[in-house]
């Protein structure tokens, strides 16, 4: 049983939780809870090792997981309950933590609807948008400079497993990245209502950051800016909600050919 914070595995997880450089250097990240463990497993991302509490191991689900992990020769080690908070990023720890390889989902050749996140700053928002994109069937997401690290622990937790299935690419050259796409930038004061846009593929949707929206570079490359008409009196929508509306609208238009 691990009973000290000086344990090498504990030290490694703490670095992965707190340092982007450590995640890049190790090519790994730390995940918590059976949901993320399941999503990583389904994607073929076998844990390097797993830490668990005795309380979790004694549950039917925990016992089944330990059998699965040990059958694949994954090193599993019990951790003392008082040490568990040192390797988690949540208020209520879920009893199991694993270190898994950094997701590397292949970038597809054909992306009819590309999502570009431009300077989104909040990791919880970023993760929730990735989860939404995965649910909407998006085949590729690009992140521009100034966007929060998608493998930030809060982003991974909010993504609910999307990171292990969704192709994600970091880009520096927006012009090259958007070449060949009709580009729409989401803007509360956009030129055209979102349902009047031409969503026929290939099209790229650029969603800007919470405070200042999309960058000038992204706007200069846009064919148009689009807004979500709001018959109520709210001034704007949360970036996650706005992204969800636009992504499902665009995906539906492409699927049904109603653009």
Image (cartoon, rainbow, N blue to C red):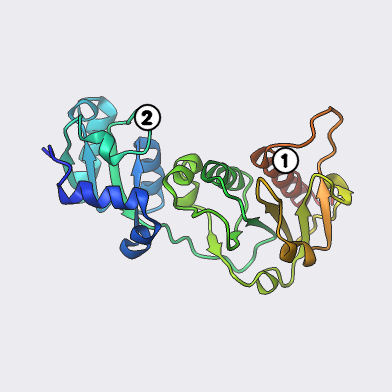
At 13% from the left and 40% from the top, the residue drawn is: 4
Q: Name the residue tied to disc 2.
A: 91
- In the displayed structure, does residue 90 sit left or right of residue 203? left
Q: Nearer the viewer, residue 127 or 38?
A: 127
Disc 2, SS: loop
Dot 1 surroundings within 10 Å: few (below 14), some, or many (20 or more)? Answer: some
Q: Residue furthest front?
A: 211
Name the element at disc 1: helix
Q: Which residue is mark 1?
A: 245
Q: Is residue 74 visible?
A: no
Residue 251, image x and y in percent?
Answer: 72, 49
- Residue 62, located in which quarter of the rendered image? top left
Q: Distance of mark 1 from mark 2, alpha carbons?
A: 30 Å
Q: Position of residue 74 (x, y in %)?
A: 21, 50
Q: Is residue 127 visible?
A: yes
Indicate which disc, 1 or 2, sits on the residue closer to the N terminus: 2
Between circles 1 and 2, the one closer to the viewer is 2
Residue 29 drawn above or below residue 39: below
Tag on residue 157?
A: none
> Of residues 221 and 50, which is closer to you in this image?
221
Give the x, y percent position of residue 3.
12, 37
Image quadrant containing the N terminus = top left
Where residue 227 sits in the image (x, y, percent)? 82, 45
Tell me which residue sits at (48%, 51%) in the image: 163
Q: Residue at x 76, y 61 (%)?
A: 201
Q: Report the side of 105 relative to 17 (left or right).
A: right
């Amino acid at each position: 049983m691990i009973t000290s914070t000086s344990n090498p595995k504990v030290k490694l997880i703490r670095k992965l939780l707190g340092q982007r450089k450590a995640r890049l250097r190790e090519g790994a990240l730390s995940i918590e809870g059976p949901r993320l463990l399941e999503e990583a497993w389904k994607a073929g991302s076998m844990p390097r090792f797993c830490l668990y509490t005795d309380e979790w191991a004694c549950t039917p689900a925990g016992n089944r997981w330990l059998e699965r992990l040990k059958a694949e020769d994954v090193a599993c080690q019990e951790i003392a309950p008082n040490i568990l908070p040192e390797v988690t990023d949540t208020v209520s720890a879920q009893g199991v933590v694993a270190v898994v390889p950094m997701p590397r989902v292949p970038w597809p050749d054909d992306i009819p609807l590309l999502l570009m996140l431009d300077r989104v700053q909040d990791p919880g928002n970023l993760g929730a948008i990735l989860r939404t994109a995965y649910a909407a069937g998006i085949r590729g997401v690009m992140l521009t400079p100034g966007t929060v690290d998608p493998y930030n622990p809060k982003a991974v937790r909010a993504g609910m497993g999307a990171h292990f299935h969704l192709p994600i690419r970091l880009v520096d050259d927006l012009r090259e990245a958007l070449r060949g796409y009709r580009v729409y930038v989401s803007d509360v004061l956009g030129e055209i209502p979102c349902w009047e846009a031409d969503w026929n593929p290939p099209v790229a949707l650029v969603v800007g950051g919470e405070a200042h929206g999309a960058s000038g570079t992204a706007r200069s490359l846009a064919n148009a800016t689009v807004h979500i008409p709001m018959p109520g009196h709210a001034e704007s929508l949360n970036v996650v909600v706005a992204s969800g509306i636009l992504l499902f609208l665009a995906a539906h238009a492409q699927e049904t050919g109603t653009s």
